[in-house]
Each structure stands twice: as structure tokens, then as C-alpha cells.
Amino acid sequence: MTSKRISKILELKQFTTDMYEAELKKSMNSLRNEEAKLSFIEKDIQTTIDEYSQTEEDGLVNLQKFELYYNYLQHMNKKAQKQKEIISRKTLDVQNKKNKVIDVLKEKKMVEILLNKLLDEEIKESDKKEQKELDFNYLSRKTRK
């Protein structure tokens, strides 16, 4: 392979890396949004529990209010559970995308190493040719004298 061909492969690897990193960033932002939603739900649950506790302390709890609080808390707990499932799926997705980025970066590094070795060999070969030409010129001049 020539160094030009390997350079093109390296450019392709860079493009792929950038693409996977953008996907990872998008997934991480989505995960943060879902975590914020869960935090809001949990705060809402805690606020409702605090309100109920305060109402209970004041002695103003009747069966209808109790049922209302109970149904609302049950609904919010289901919502929180669904949100936790979403977060676990998003976390898994983020981890998979991180692994893809790592794999692509490893491949890119291997291509860079290959390119560097090839360039080193080309430089050595060029130096050898140049030295042969210099030696030939020197010997040619020396024999003409």
C-alpha cells in the first residue's frame, strides 16, 4: 500500500470517529434529559408525601383525600419506574456507543502507526537512493581525474 492510500484510509477513520463521537454526544444529552425528568418525578413524589404528612399532622385527612393521595402516588411511582427503565436503556446505548468510539479510535491508531512505519520506510529508501547517487557522483568524479 502506498502512503497516499493509507492517508485516505486515515481520513475515513477520522470521519467515522467524528460521526460516532457526535452520536455519543447526542445519546449522552438524551440520557441527561431523561435523568432530569426522573429527578423531577422523584421531587414531585417527595413533595406530595410531604404535603400528605403535613395534612395528616393537621388532622385534616379524610378517606377521599387519602385515596386521592394514594392514587396519585401510585401513578407517579409507575411513571418513575418507566423513567428508570428508559434511563437504563439509554445508559446501555451510551455504553455501546462509547465502545464503538473506542474501537474506531483503536483502528485509527493502528492505521496511524502503519502510516508512520510506511513513511519511515519511504524516507529510508529515499535516503538510500540519495546516498547511492552521491556515491556514484563522487566515484565518477574521482575516476575522471
Image: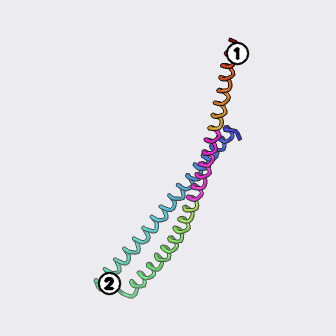
Viewer can see residue 101: yes
Tell me what residue is drawn at x 54 percent, y 61 percent: 94
Q: Main secondary structure of the magenta part?
A: helix
Q: The disc labelled 1 sits on which kind of residue?
A: Thr
Badge 2 crowding class, 10 Å Cα cut-off, few under 14, some 14 to 19, many 20 or more, is: few
Taking the image as shown, residue 102 lies to the left or right of residue 50, namely right
In the rendered image, the quadrant that contains the N terminus is top right
Write the start and end of the magenta stretch as one range.
97-118
In the displayed structure, 125 sits above or below 92; it is above
Q: In which quarter of the view is residue 92 placed? A: bottom right
Distance CA(mark 2)–CA(mark 1): 114 Å
Q: Which residue is mark 2?
A: 56
The type of residue carrying mark 2 is Glu
Q: Nearer the viewer, mark 2 or mark 1?
A: 1
Q: Is residue 100 magenta?
A: yes
x, y percentage for residue 100? 60, 57
Residue farthest along the bottom direction in this orientation: 63
Q: Nearer the viewer, residue 127 or 111?
A: 127
What residue does disc 1 label? Answer: 143
Residue found at x 52% / y 73%? 82
